[in-house]
Amino acid sequence: MCDERQLADMARSPGAMNRRSFAALGGAAVLAGCTSAGEPAQAGDGVPGASGVLRSEVAIATPAGTADATFYRPAQGAHPAIIMWPDIAGVRPASQQMAQRLAAAGYAVLHPNPYYRSVKGQQFADFASFMGEEGFAKVGPWREKNTPEAVMADSKAFVAWLDAQDAVDTSRGIGANGHCMTGSWTFYAAAAAPERVKAAASMHGGGLVTDAPNSPHRIMQAGAMYLVCISQDDDAKQPDAKDALQTAAEAAGAKAEITVYPADHGWTVLDSPKYAEMEAERAWARMLEAFGGL
């Protein structure tokens, strides 16, 4: 997960994406004209097939209350399901665009609010707003509620909800995708519902290797696929993590692809100051490959 030093570095980045440049990507169009009735999502630049995707705002009962989420899926047929969590800045147009794009690739995508225990809906317009509004401090109390046990309970509830949807092909496995602080959540999802969650894709995820008994690398599941995309600066901070993950995967009988990318933390997120298109597309392609085996 990004820390305050990395946020300060992001703020100084000459390539920092502002609201105007993100809008040029079509991010604002993702939210236009969408209702809870499941109307077609609006096509935005860089979202091939978006016109064939439906979007609904949904509420899901969990042991902690009611989680608000967005459900994207192709307009026709049943498809493998994906739980796609946003990064530390939460649900916003950039993360919605990414979820919509994944649905356009042929998946039923649940995009939950990671902070539903504390607040509902969008809290920041974009990553620039997160940084400019002291977002790191603001989300701190919300983030503390997302213990490994809480994330696993949520994952079970999300899996049960997805399996009850006509748009989900329950004969196929479920995937999980997370960015930044939610990269580790993909491991918790696979551990919470190992009979259903068969692929976990962590994009610059933090806290994957710790000394805790329930460290993500200690709960890898036999037969599951783990795609771990590590940023070069995160690797520099914890160079032994990639080897520990590989060793843990082999011991658990899990499949793993663990790669350090020549890009900095946040490079896969559209509105991140560290967004690096070429390497983001490379990671995206590897994620589609991993989810293709569901």
Image (tube, rainbow, N blue to C red):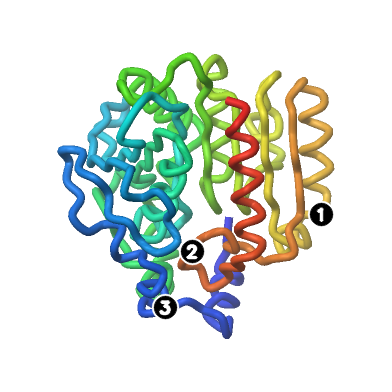
Measured Cα–Cα span from mark 3 to mark 2 = 10 Å
Measured Cα–Cα span from mark 1 to mark 3 = 34 Å
Give the quarter of the figure containing the N terminus: bottom right
Q: Secondary structure at mark 3?
A: helix
Residue positioned 36% across, 79% down in the render: 20
Q: Which residue is mark 1?
A: 239
Asked whether the beta carbons under mark 1 and mark 3 sit within 8 Å of each other, the answer is: no
Q: Nearer the viewer, residue 259 or 282?
A: 282
Lateral position of residue 223 relative to residue 294, left or right: right
Relative vertical location of residue 197 with respect to residue 82 in this rendering, above or below: above
Does label 1 or label 3 sit earlier along the sequence?
3
- Quarter of the image for residue 103 reads top left
Does label 2 or label 1 sit earlier along the sequence?
1
Mark nearer the viewer, 1 or 3: 3
Answer yes or no: is residue 140 visible: no
Three-letter code for the amino acid on which mark 2 is drawn: Leu
x and y, in percent, of residue 263 in the image? 69, 66
Q: Secondary structure at mark 2?
A: loop
Q: Which residue is mark 2?
A: 270
Mark nearer the viewer, 2 or 1: 2
x and y, in percent, of residue 38 in the image? 21, 38
Q: Which residue is mark 3?
A: 21
x and y, in percent, of residue 9 in the image? 60, 77
Three-letter code for the amino acid on which mark 3 is drawn: Ser
Does label 3 or label 2 sit earlier along the sequence?
3
x and y, in percent, of residue 188 in the image? 55, 31
Residue 23: mark in rendering = none
